[in-house]
Amino acid sequence: MNLTNLLRSSLLVLGLALPAMAAAPKKLLVVTVTTGFRHSSIETAEKVLKELGEKSGAWTVDYVHQPGGQPKNPGRPPEKKPQDSDESFKAKQEAYSKALADYNAANKVWNDQVKAYMAEKMAIEKIKDYDGFVFANTTGDLQFPDREGFVELIKGGKAMVAMHSGSDTYHPFRGYVDMLGGEFETHKAQVEVQPILHDPAHAATRPIPTGFKVFDEIYIIKSYEKSQVHALMGLDAHPNDKTPGYFPMSWCKEFGKGRVFYTSLGHREDVWDPTWREGTPDRKNSPEIAKTYQEHILGGIQWALKLAEGDGTPGNLK
């Protein structure tokens, strides 16, 4: 046997002897930076996303965390109450004005720190090798060094996933809103809803059982066009006052060569995590509901990464 045939035989033996190698897990970058409201569920979301990747073997995660030192907003100005004298109310107004001025000064410094931090963490050259990005309850202007370049990165074939306030992000930047397919407008009190499943065969909705109900902060979405997205979940009446109309909750879309998946659920820790404060009055959702939510986002992420089947054709909801 000559050397060439010997090498061929050896490779054949090795190929038969070794099991087929599983595909390497995809690489996800989870962004949880907020320059607006910061949800208490973010740390829970970070944990769950890592666990889902490990259990499924579908992805690994790296994080772009919140830079430390964000100052606390003093909130709304004081309102005069019946027990307030003119002098006491004036003192409250002066104290608020000082607190607001101090906050604005500190917030400017902090935003400069965020800008420098994001210039390092989100430079296109540093993130271009990730397979996808998850905006887990981000808010505000994330101060990417090249936000247009980021959108083009998704269009070029990456996965883009956002939960809950991922739609309350980059409002003035229409490139982000158009990519995502909608944006947060407002919300009222947390409430239990029973979403309509528009595509029960999709990877993101297939795990959701008939009659599924969830207690959460339900967003009212604007800048949403049915013809531009593939609807997954929604309501046929306002979640709180029951005014008839269509209120989207989850959708997906093809975006150039990339894919986008969004779900507005995920405000509460007990939506994300079946073990969060288990057995206490703080839980409004059963562990089974949280497990269903995890399967919902698992399927959505896998679809966005092109690891799971699902229709992304826009305009399925007339």
Image (cartoon, rainbow, N blue to C red):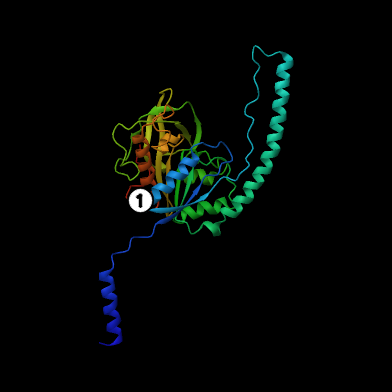
Residue at x 40% of width, y 50% of height? 53
Element at badge 1? helix
Is residue 43 shown to the viewer in this render?
yes
Image position, residue 192 (x, y; %): 39, 27
**Image location of residue 130, percent across then percent down:** 47, 56
Residue for badge 1: 56
Q: Give neighbour class at mark 1: few <14, some 14-19, many 20+ (Cα, 10 Å).
A: few
Residue 181 visible in the displayed image? no
Q: In the rendered view, would you say 259 is above or below 167? A: below
Using the image as rendered, state which of residue 202 and residue 292 is in the foreground: 292
Residue that appears at 52% across and 38% down: 168
Picture layout, residue 35 above or below residue 152: above
In the picture, residue 123 is in which quadrant? bottom right
For badge 1, the amino acid type reads: Ser
Residue 3 drawn at (x, y percent):
30, 86
Identify which residue is drawn at 29% across, 76% down.
11
In the picture as drawn, the residue positioned furthest to the top comes out as: 82
Count of numbered circles on the image: 1
Residue 50 as seen in the image, left or right of residue 121: left
Q: Quadrant of the C terminus?
A: top left
Query: Which image quadrant: the N terminus?
Result: bottom left
The front one of 227 and 218 is 218
Seen as rendered, the residue at the extreme bottom is 2
* Percent of width and height locating residue 80: 66, 17
Residue furthest toward the front?
279
